[in-house]
Image (cartoon, rainbow, N blue to C red):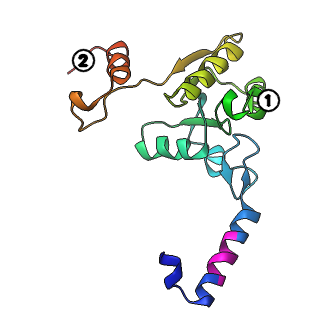
Amino acid sequence: MKLLDLSSDEIDAFANSMIDMKRKIQSCSRCNMLTDKDICDICSDSSREDSLLCVVEQSRDLFAIERGGGYRGRYFVLGGKLSPLNGVGPEDLAFDMLIRLLESSDITEIILATGSDVEGEATSVYAHRLLRRSDRKISRIAYGVPVGSSLDFADEMTLMRAIEGRHEYTT
C-alpha cells in the first residue's frame, strides 16, 4: 500500500532501479553467491580462512551467518535445497560447481549449514554422501535453543538436537 502513496516519478525511479538491479546481479563465479561482480567481496577477501568452507542453501543464509560475526572462512551457495515434491533434484542445485571448487582448493573442512526442515536435512545428507569420498572433515551446524528463549517454547526436535549437540562447559 505504501507504493500507492508514491508519485509517478518515484514509481518510475523505483521500477528502473529494480530493472537495473536485475541486470547487474549475478552469481559469484567461485562461491555462487549473488553479487554485482564476477568474484564477490567475500571470495576476494584475503583475510578469510581458506581451509574452511561453509555450504549454505541461499545467499540470504550466508548473510545471516556473516551477521553473527563468528565465522571467517569461505562459503558456497547451493542455490536452493532438495525438494522432490517441488521438482528440485540434485541436478537443479550447484553440486557440480561445488565439486569443481573442492578439486581446486586447499579446503580441509566443509561445514554443512542447510536448514533444519525436511528438505534442508535431505540436502545435508545428500551433500555428505557426495562429499564423504574426500579426506576432508565434514561437519554439520549445531542446532539449539535461541538465545533469550525459554525451553518451554522450543519444539521437541530443537531440544533433542540441543542435547545431542551439547559441549563441555568451560569457564
Quarter residue 171 falls in: top left
Mark 2: few, some, or many residues within 10 Å (few <14, many ≥20)? few
- x and y, in percent, of residue 58 in the image: 61, 42
Q: Is residue 4 left or right of residue 144?
A: right
Q: Is residue 77 magenta?
A: no
Label 1, label 2: how many angstroms apart (C-alpha)?
A: 42 Å
Query: Tag 1: residue type?
Result: Glu
- Residue count near mark 1 (Cα–Cα under 10 Å), binned few <14, some 14–19, many ≥20: few
Residue 129 position by quadrant = top right
Q: Are marks 1 and 2 in contact (CB under 8 Å)?
A: no
Of helix, strand and loop, which one carries label 1? helix
- Near-viewer residue (85 or 79): 85
Tag 2: amino acid: Tyr
Q: Say which quarter of the image contains residue 163.
A: top left
Name the residue: 62% across, 89% down. 9
Q: Earlier in the sequence, mark 1 or mark 2?
A: 1
Dot 2 lies on which element? loop
Magenta: predominant secondary structure element? helix
Q: Where is residue 124 shown, x and y percent of the image?
A: 59, 22
- Which residue has dot 1 on it? 91
- Residue beneath disc 2: 169
In the image, the segment drawn in magenta is 12-18
**Residue 148 in the image, given as x and y percentages of width and height:** 23, 38
Q: Position of residue 3 (x, y in %)?
A: 53, 78
Q: Nearer the viewer, residue 120 or 26?
A: 120
Residue 86 vertical placement versus 125 (above, below): below
Question: Which residue is at a point 47% across and 36% down the rendered structure image?
Answer: 71
